[in-house]
Amino acid sequence: MSSLVMFSCSNHNTFTIEGEVPQERLEGKWVFIVPLDSAVKAQIGVDSTIIKDHKFRFIGNREYVGDIRIAAHFRYGTENLLVVTEPGTIKVCIDTVSYGGGTRQNDLLQRYKEFMMSTNKVLVEQNQHYRYLIHQGDTAYASALRDSMMQYMKWRRTEAQTFVDKAESGTLHDFLKQLYNR
């Protein structure tokens, strides 16, 4: 009975990352989870496992922001993925565009990533158009577009900071707060 109680208490803080890798070329290759915080990395190191049947799994009991990545020589064509190793089951897919979720912080982190990707796309398109206008000599329209881009970036930063508030507290909150309080 005491073993069962000890197991269930220790299991309470356990995270499980259930990963999927659809790319056939990555079968049998190494996947890593690297803590972003150098102090955590020094304490627990980098965890790794091999992709088998397009799947991988990490289990642990320390909460941190980690970067899931494929071995360096095979990484091309995949996107690294940030995760919070919070208690619960985190489902991830490592592919050309990677995604994850299944726990409170990781669901919010995924929404943050999608927000940043969509707003980055807008900024890249606006910047390309701005450069085209400058090249064409249309400095009046280019100047107006530049002002619009500055407003958009200000709005984007404000919206991105709301993710800090949505995270409320914990590992993701601290990570995002660090990003936006520089």
Image (cartoon, rainbow, N blue to C red):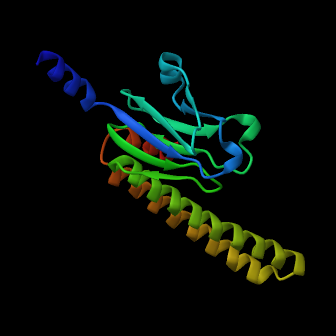
- Vertical placement of 127 versus 96: above or below? below
Identified at 46% across, 33% down, the residue is 58
Q: Nearer the viewer, residue 36 or 130?
A: 36
Q: Nearer the viewer, residue 6 or 160?
A: 6
- Vertical placement of 12 versus 140: above or below? above
Q: Left or right of 128: which side holds 167?
A: left
Identified at 15% across, 22% down, the residue is 5
- Vertical placement of 97 versus 16: above or below? below
Identified at 72% across, 35% down, the residue is 72
Instruction: Return the x and y of residue 29 as percentages of the image width and height.
Output: 67, 35
Question: Which quadrant would residue 26 be assigned to in this image?
Answer: top right
Instruction: Return the x and y of residue 22 as percentages of the image width and height.
Output: 60, 52
Identified at 76% across, 76% down, the residue is 129
Question: Which quadrant would residue 121 be assigned to in this image?
Answer: bottom right
Instruction: Return the x and y of residue 152 as percentages of the image width and height.
Output: 57, 70
Quadrant in the picture for the N terminus? top left
Instruction: Return the x and y of residue 91 as percentages of the image width and height.
Output: 43, 48
- Vertical placement of 43 versus 53: above or below? above
| Residue that sits furthest to the left in the current view | 1
Q: Left or right of 4: which side holds 122?
A: right
Q: Left or right of 72: which side holds 63?
A: left
Q: Left or right of 161: which side holds 81?
A: right
